[in-house]
């Protein structure tokens, strides 16, 4: 397999092109491996083992009882970092919704406002939470 | 003195002045409406003397402003929704205003006067709740449209 790299300052998004005589299982595996690649994955701890979490697999990150957790579709992981630090490291599609929670904007299903005046957010994996009013405009900007 | 303490003092002072403007404004308008004029109710002036009534009304109005400002903290507390925050703020502020309006004779110290005052305050808070609730509702609606667009129209 030959690997070539082309530098082009006008390219906005890194693009990987695979050229082959025909589509095969090897090519499918290669595509999966590239899709699974995530720069600087986050270490998630669950039941004594460490998992490299792809950022796009994270639905939300939240603080509870002075610890920080990440929910994915498969599991909840303990993270050894602070919400503040994670907020700095995470890509733009992650948005803070309250003092104790950051969510992946790509994983939001909908939001609603109840009569009490609290804003509820529904995410993939049947995850529900509340959005603080002061962060509502930030959520809108993240989705734009 | 640290930055937070300085900020609290500045806000307290500003809310005291705002309270004085509102309180003295109310008394002045009521004086104009009744035709007696003046900055304080004539009955309040009879009780404490003109200067004493003005000083007392100014201090009480300032306290009213500070209570209103301090109470607005509930709008910033994540635990409270718009309705709960408005109810809490309204309960504290309206109670303070009812006491001060009675002390300063703004409501004429009659049940009808107190009821009119109370009704006016409730209307103000109903308007505050209505505008906050519906602006949030519109914002949530816009966000839902953006979510649908982002998810390619799928739920």
Image (cartoon, coloured by chain):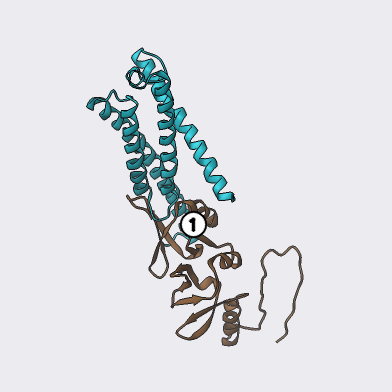
The C terminus of chain A, quarter of image = bottom right
Please name the color used to draw chain B. Answer: cyan
Which quadrant of the view contains residue B108? top left
* Image location (x, y in percent) of residue B25: 43, 24
* Image location (x, y in percent) of residue A40: 62, 75
Q: Residue at x 32, y 42 (%)?
A: B91
Q: Which residue is mark 1?
A: B149
Q: Secondary structure at mark 1?
A: helix
The N terminus of chain A, quarter of image = bottom right
Number of labelled discs?
Answer: 1
**Which chain identifier belongs to the brown chain?**
A
Which quadrant of the view contains residue B79? bottom left
* Image location (x, y in percent) of residue A39: 63, 75
* Image location (x, y in percent) of residue A140: 51, 53
Farthest residue in the top direction?
A: B35
Taking depth in this image into account, of A87 and B149 the one nearest to the observer is: A87
Q: Chain of mark 1?
A: B
Taking depth in this image into account, of A61 and B24 the one nearest to the observer is: B24
């Amino acid at each position: 397999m030959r690997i070539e790299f082309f530098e082009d300052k006008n390219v906005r998004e890194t693009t990987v092109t695979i050229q082959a005589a025909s589509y095969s299982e090897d090519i499918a595996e290669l595509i999966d491996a590239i899709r699974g690649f995530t720069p600087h994955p986050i270490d998630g701890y669950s039941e004594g083992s460490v998992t490299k979490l792809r950022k796009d697999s994270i639905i939300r990150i939240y603080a509870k009882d002075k610890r920080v957790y990440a929910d994915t579709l498969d599991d909840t992981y303990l993270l050894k970092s602070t919400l503040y630090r994670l907020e700095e490291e995470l890509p733009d599609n992650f948005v803070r919704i309250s003092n104790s929670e950051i969510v992946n904007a790509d994983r939001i299903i909908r939001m609603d406002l109840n009569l009490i005046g609290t804003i509820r957010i529904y995410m993939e994996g049947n995850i529900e939470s509340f959005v603080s009013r002061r962060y509502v405009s930030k959520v809108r900007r993240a989705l734009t | 003195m640290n930055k937070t303490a300085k900020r609290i003092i500045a806000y307290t002072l500003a809310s005291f002045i705002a309270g004085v403007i509102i309180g003295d404004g109310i008394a002045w308008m009521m004086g104009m409406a009744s035709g007696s004029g003046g900055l304080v109710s004539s009955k309040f002036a009879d009780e404490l003397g003109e200067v004493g009534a003005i000083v007392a009304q100014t201090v009480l109005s300032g306290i009213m402003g500070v209570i209103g400002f301090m109470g607005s903290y509930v709008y910033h507390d994540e635990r409270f929704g718009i309705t709960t925050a408005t109810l809490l703020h309204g309960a504290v502020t309206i109670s303070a205003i009812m006491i001060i309006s009675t002390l300063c004779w703004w409501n004429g110290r009659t049940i009808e006067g107190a009821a009119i005052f109370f009704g006016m305050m409730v209307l103000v808070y109903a308007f505050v709740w209505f505008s906050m609730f519906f602006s949030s509702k519109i914002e949530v609606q816009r966000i839902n449209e953006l979510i649908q667009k982002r998810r390619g129209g799928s739920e």
